[in-house]
Amino acid sequence: MKILDLDQLDLNKTYSYADYLKWQFDERIELIKGKIFKMSPAPATRHQQYVGEIFRQISNHLHRNTCKVFVAPFDVRLTPSQKTDSTKIHTVVQPDICVVCDPSKIDAKGCIGAPDLIIEVLSPGNTQKEMNEKFEIYRENGVKEYWLVEPNDRIVLVYVLDESGKYIGLKPFTESETLTSQSLDSFKLLVKEIFEV
């Protein structure tokens, strides 16, 4: 049965990607461990400008590269065991930006498995979700590198997955500093360029 309105769903129930594919309502949602999380309404202009600038710089860097960069809305289906059966996938997220270097993870519906790099730009409505739920699912699913862009303090927090599967937080990158990525060979981004758009 197709679901045309979010109100038709029980938000306390656990859902799979197979369920998610049947939903045809306007609200943007993410599925985290089977639970529905409503996404903020359309992001503020400033948020979109920051996302656009980061995407532009990564896209230029990756021109003619095996790694591909994607911007939301783009479904990333996560599962620790890389299952492809949609009834067994219970996490579908739409990161602001993600980079996928393994072409076999990209299909017509988005990405299946962990991207190499995920970048989220924080906004007032999503900070708790990005800092708690998503941090854990990205770590559990093997996302090698996770950036949190904090517009209020004009910093970028970078977490890198270590050999034991734990995120190691690097020192905050401030506007005067240049970010480099462990996932993207030789990529450099001056932090202040994100916020000067």
Image (spheres, helix red, strand yellow):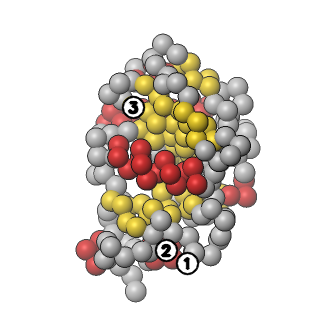
First-in-chain label (2 vs 1): 2
Return the residue at label 3: 150
Q: Which residue is mark 2?
A: 16
Q: Position of residue 180 (x, y in %)?
A: 62, 25
| Total marks in image | 3
- Name the residue rendered at 72%, 51% in the picture: 102
- Residue type, label 2: Ser
Of residues 53 and 188, the one nearer the viewer is: 188
The quadrant the N terminus occupies is bottom left
Q: Residues within 10 Å of mark 3 (few under 14, many from 20)?
A: some
Circle 2 crowding by C-alpha within 10 Å: few under 14, some 14–19, many from 20 = many
Task: Quadrant for residue 144, please give it.
Answer: top right
For the point 41% across and 44% down, which residue is it?
Answer: 131
The residue under label 3 is which amino acid type? Glu
The tag earlier along the polypeptide, 2 or 3, is 2
Which SS class for mark 2?
loop
Q: CA–CA distance between discs 2 and 3?
A: 31 Å
Q: In 3D space, how far apart are the residues under numbered discs 1 and 3 (Cα atoms)?
A: 35 Å
Which residue corresponds to mark 1?
87
Name the foreground residue: 5 vs 17: 17
Is residue 129 something one can see in this rendering?
yes
Q: Quadrant of the C terminus?
A: top left
* Amino acid at pointer 1: Thr
Q: Is residue 24 above or below residue 126?
A: below
Residue 53: where, in percent of width, then height? 47, 30
Residue that appears at 35% across and 46% down: 128
- In this view, the residue in front, 47 or 16, is 16
Report how far apart the C-alphas of labels 2 and 1 lie in the structure: 5 Å
Q: Among all residues in the image, which is located at the extreme front?
A: 164
**In which image quadrant can residue 81 be found?**
bottom right
Residue at the outermost bottom position: 1
